Image: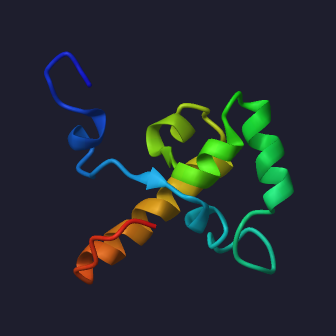
Amino acid sequence: MAADGHRGDQDKGWQEVIVTRTHLFTIPGFSKRNGFCRSKSADWFRSHGLDWRSFIKHGIEADVLEATGDGLAIALVKWARQCEAMKNADGDSTGG
């Protein structure tokens, strides 16, 4: 939370998103099939000091992925936000 009492995501005009394994395994456009590879993703999490098992069970806050500065992580966050926006537009408030 910023010193002014607002979260950064509020300043950017979006609601904070929890990126889930559903997002990870459905992101389009990076290979012939949708989604990122499970084993390479687990390696990526370890190389960035992030807990893969916790991610699989609970997801991870978008800003944690963005803080890595990694282009694929940023693309995944963008995909997660698009998915959540589509759910909200459809009136579905369940998480992914």
Q: Is residue 3 above or below residue 17?
A: above
User: Is the N terminus in the top left, top right, bottom left or bottom right quadrant?
Assistant: top left
Residue 43 percent coordinates (x, y): 83, 43
Residue 31 percent coordinates (x, y): 79, 72
Quadrant of the image occupied by residue 37? bottom right
Give the residue drawn at x 25%, y 78%. Answer: 89
Q: Is residue 94 left or right of residue 2?
A: right
Q: Is residue 41 left or right of residue 27?
A: right
Q: Is residue 45 left or right of residue 19?
A: right
Residue at the farthest bottom position:
90
Instruction: Say how many tags the image has.
Output: 0
The front one of 26 and 20 is 20
Residue 50 percent coordinates (x, y): 66, 33
Q: Is residue 36 above or below residue 45?
A: below
Structure colour scheme: rainbow
Quadrant of the image occupied by residue 82? bottom left
Give the residue drawn at x 28%, y 78%. Answer: 92
Residue 39 percent coordinates (x, y): 85, 55
